[in-house]
Amino acid sequence: MFDHIDHYPGDPILSLAQAYLRDPCPEKVNLGIGMYYDEAGRTPMLEAVQGAKAILAADLEVTGIDKDVAGYLPMEGCPEYRHAIQCLLFGEDSSAVEGGRIATIQTLGGSGALKVGADLLKQFFPSSEVWVSQPTWDNHQALFAGAGFKVNGYPYYDRSRGGIVFDEMTRVLRSLPAQSIVLMHPCCHNPTGADLTRRQWQEVIDVIAARGLIPFLDIAYQGLGEDLEGDAHVIRSMAVAGIRFLVANSFSKNLALYGERCGGLSVVCQDAEEASRVLGQLKATVRKNYSSPPTYGARLAATVLSNAELKRLWKEELDAMRARIQRMRGRLCHALASRMPMHDFSYLIRQRGMFSYTNLTVAQIDQLREDYSVYLVRSGRLCLTGLNDRNVDYVAEAIATVVGRA
Ligand code: LMR
């Protein structure tokens, strides 16, 4: 009966993470999956999250009701969590939030938000096509194609400079038909680490408005580029410009809540009436997929975001994570430059977030993994959080060797 079901070759990122775990080499270095690791190579449990756990445990003690299992959340998720997402993305004083013109639902991580958004768009814009940056997160293509869309690429990354081919990008955006869906990364571009400047974003917003495009912003690394506010700049500018758009967000990385799958999907509408219709359809989409989201992670996130002391603590912890990544960027740049002085690695320092894009070939990346147990995604993406003071020279030496120090 199942003879025609093909073998699944695995996911380029998630399967690599499993392979890393299986590798017995004591020197192994994980520069593959986009997760934050501290200097000791551990995924930290944030103090702000521990504080939230204590508050929820105390609540259980007092009420005797385990809110995580005692009932279902509504299809759209936990109300406090949804409100906290709106304030974080759009700002505490956002007139769009105030005016009720954003429909936000809790989702199963950022991927869940993209999937629900993709399903909604396919239902109401069946003939639109999707445009993603070249390159983009490996799963974007699969996810939108899986929802039934034709997925195309717009020019984005300039390999020779480690920057952005902005003129080519906007030339393509200007040529798209109205209601084309354009997937963009508000900060910490995955996989390249190359972000648009604020001036460039303004130009993109002007093109989007003029062409009637549908932006879908995927923000999975808020707080790890500039800071929580700065990383949300384009989201807030689009809302102020009166554009209608979608935003997928995730707390996997910035709250280190990976396994809790805490995400959100927000659809910015023209007015509250439109937002209420969109919210209804989002709920219908959720019901068709998984009925309603789980409780605990959303309550944790909502507690951190709504408690002034925990939020302050969280911001401090995020500052420290960001500073560590930036320091590792500097250390890797220096370690590579001293081994390969003919090359310019300064792009590593200019880029933002967890990732950078190497110009390594697939064969070189395979050799890094096989000979040195240094794991990079085969696209060439390198996640800087796996670096620390103990392994950065080992990694630089391995890279210099596989490229022949050329
Ligand atoms: C990544 O890009 O490595 C992470 O977002 C994990 C994933 O799901 O791919």
Image (tube, grey):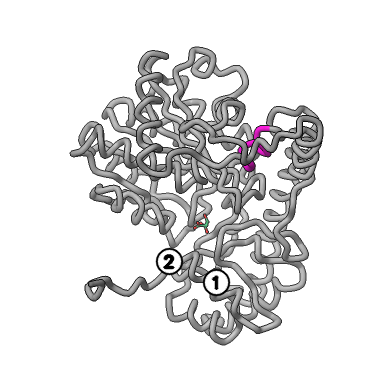
Label 1 environment density (alpha carbons within 10 Å; few <14, some 14–19, many ≥20): few
Q: Which residue is drawn at 64% across and 73% down?
A: 29
Residue at horizontal 39 percent and vertical 21 percent from the top: 269
The answer to whether one can see residue 347 in this image is no
Q: Label 2: which residue?
A: 11
- Residue 212 inside the magenta-drawn segment: no
Q: Considering the image in quadrants, where does the N terminus appear?
A: bottom left
What is the magenta range?
A: 296-302
Identified at 35% across, 71% down, the residue is 8
Residue 339 on image: x %, y %: 64, 77
Which mark is first along the chain, 1 or 2? Answer: 2
The disc labelled 1 sits on which kind of residue? Gln
The percent position of residue 371, horizontal first and vertical second, equals: 57, 87
- Between residues 336 and 106, which one lies in front from this camera angle? 106
Query: In the rendered image, which quarter is residue 128 located in?
Result: top left
Q: Position of residue 139 (x, y in %)?
A: 41, 56
Residue extending farthest bottom? 371
**Pointer 1 residue:** 18
